Image: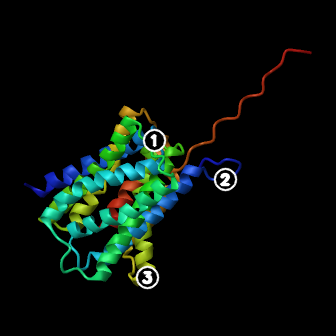
Amino acid sequence: MQTDHGRLPIWLWYAFLCIFWWGLWGFLSKIGSGTANPLQMQILFTLGMLPVAIGMLLHMRGRLDRERIGVSYGFLCGIATGLGTLGYFAALRTQDASVVTPLTGVFPILTVALAFVVLRERLNKVQMGGMLLALASIVILST
Amino acid sequence: MHWMIYAGVAIVLWGVNGLFMKLGTNRVSARSMVIWVTAGFVVLLPWMWKLTTLQGLSSRVIFVGLLAGAVNGLGNWAVFACLEKGAKASVAIPLTALYPLCTVALATVFLNERPTKLQWIGIVLAVAAGAMLSYEPAPAAPKEQVSCAP
């Protein structure tokens, strides 16, 4: 791990924080999905995100970044995630979650490939090995 | 339509999303991204309302679902902040996709679920993957200049 005077880089702490929040999201989804269908859960997730977004807006005192291209990417992120989730749910209607979830869990491969081509990002050999282990782990833990 | 097509749509959209996240945080702040992403989700809301309603759900399930949405939003902020602080998309996206590790840990502690042998393998792989993905050798220290001066 890259260290700055023996400390972890700040981005890594945010990655850990993200793993915690999304992990908690997965845990709560597990509890809620016993009685609610996936689409109902998705509606509740969207409504639940609103207070966080409003909180961020208040914290920024309304100074929301409005750079057109950046906003478009943000907006597309929401639509792409939402539509992807609906595709995932549609697949679940005719196939078991134990098949669909691990399969769709390999999406980071596409991100890595796109980042390689579009952003010219390069992974070192250790990170490449880590990505392969991550994919194996995602597939296993999704079943 | 075959389920594989739907699953393929999910893979493509989620995969492309990882790129959009990085491109977006290159231009606007992480907090602004959370707001615009939420707006993208809200656009889909009327369509989802047409397909289902929340009738019949207990207040407990509704509360849990809303809480899940809120923590998901916080997770979105954290991944945007991670990218904003310089993480590569090709590192941050596979790394944060390891979140099921945390879900399994929480289910073990609070729901008394016991990980299967296969899940234990997945947990070990996830921890190793996390360490390897976050490995970036520190830049080499500049070589001392050899001076010809006496």
Q: Any mark on residue A7, and which?
A: 2
Q: Chain of mark 1?
A: B
Q: Spot the residue most to the left.
A: B1
x then y, percent, for residue B13: 26, 48
Q: Spot the residue most to the bottom.
A: B112
Label 1 packing within 10 angstroms: few (<14), some (14-19), many (20+)? many
Quadrant into which the N terminus of chain B falls: bottom left
Render colour scheme: rainbow
Q: Any mark on residue B28, and which?
A: 1
Instruction: Determine if residue B98 is in view.
Output: no
> At label 2, which amino acid type do we have?
Arg
Label 3 packing within 10 angstroms: few (<14), some (14-19), many (20+)? few
Quarter where residue B16 is shown: top left
Quadrant into which the C terminus of chain B falls: top right
Work out how far the residue at label 2 is from the one at label 3, CA to CA, in angstroms. 32 Å
Q: Secondary structure at mark 1?
A: loop
Q: How many marks?
A: 3
Q: Chain of mark 2?
A: A
Q: At 32% across and 82% down in the image, what residue appears?
A: B60
Q: Secondary structure at mark 2?
A: loop
B65 horizontally vs B132: left or right: left
Q: At 36% across and 76% down in the image, what residue appears?
A: B116
| Front position in the image: B72 or A17 | B72
